[in-house]
Image (tube, rainbow, N blue to C red):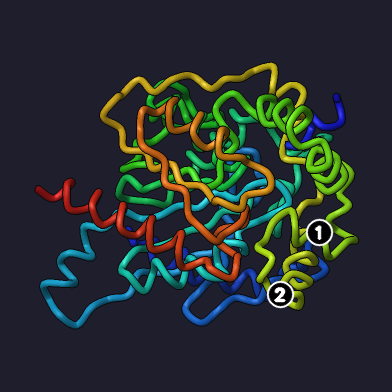
Amino acid sequence: MATLCTLILPKFPQTRLTTRTRAVLTRDYKMKVPYELKQGQSRLFHKLPSGLNMEVLYQKGLQFSDPDEEQKRSHNPPLVFIHGSFHAAWCWAEHWLPFFSQNGYDCYALSLLGQGESDSPAAAVAGTLQTHAGDIADFIHKEIELPPVLLGHSFGGLIVQYYIANIRSEAVKGSDSENKSLLPSLAGAVLVCSVPPSGNSGLVWRYLFSKPIAAFKVTRSLAAKAFQNSLPLCKETFFSAAMDDQLVVRYQQLMTESSRMPLFDLRKLNASLPVPRLEDPAFKVLVVGAKDDFIVDIEGLNETGRFYDVPTVCIEGVAHDMMLDCSWTKGAQSILSWLNGLNKAGTQ
């Protein structure tokens, strides 16, 4: 049982971007299978108060020739993407960064510490909900001018939930005394196939009693990291059955290289849950899940929706890695519709 319980633009100043982007050219890759950026994408490293560098992949929103459309684009909130376990910023750069940037949104995907090309702390795990949220807050405070929308996937969704529950109530560690930086405000949040606010305990018990074979597979795949060496298990865990095997192999390699250390000590994490409730009932949250999710079931999705008192959106024909799956456009279109509605409401 214990084993199973551990499963589960605002514009930068041009000189700063240029300097940091050039620095990447001589930087040694931490991943043996480095992710090659797509056209229009750049990589920089944000220096945290700890002195560690956090990888950021970014893509500016498309500028429109029509002045009216460009005026609308200028009101779009930036999007900041947070990955889950065994992933890094690249998982958003593959499809969703190009998609949302083409629709006029500045996009920033972060690799949490110990993941992707980010530095690793001198610890057994990458951090806690509090430290990960603090790192995200430091990036937003220093690099993003407008309140962004924070999007989190899987355990990244749980980090986003902690963040939005503590906006303006916690100081970011390392901020100077003259200008204390609290968790910066957001324009909204999107939870994508997110671990529920109570953690994965409910998922574990349901799988044990209703899907014992699935429970064994999930334990083997994630806790024992067997997905790294088994193509069928990796595919069943993260992707739809229709997913091309060659793509699965590519993502399998990237996932293996992305996670040099666990995101959390999950036993301590579960002891700290559930996350606090939102202080602001008007804060906008979208809860979106996948019908064929092998990790977060429908009840887990609905638990999150009930917690935030919002209807859930369950996308047919996609699996847990909604942003990488062969039908990735389904989730992207649903989120874009919500974002456009959020933007319209904000400008009225």
Residue at x-position 80% and y-position 60%: 257
Q: Amino acid at mark 2?
A: Leu
Numbered tag placed on residue 247 in the rendering: 2
Query: Dividing the image into 4 quarters, which one contains the N terminus?
Result: top right
The residue that disc 1 covers is 256
Which tag is nearer the camera, tag 1 or tag 2? 2
The amino acid beneath tag 1 is Thr
Q: Quadrant location of residue 295?
A: top right
When the figure is inspected, residue 97 is found, relative to residue 272, above or below; the finding is: below
- Of residue 44 and residue 202, the one placed in the foreground of this image is 202
Label 2: state its secondary structure.
helix
Q: Height in image: 244 above or below 296?
A: below
Residue at the spot 30% in from the left edge and 68% down from the top edge? 104
Disc 1 element: helix
Confirm whether residue 56 shows in the render. Answer: no
Decide which of tag 1 and tag 2 comes sooner along the chain.
2
Q: Is 60 on the left-hand or right-hand side of 76?
A: right
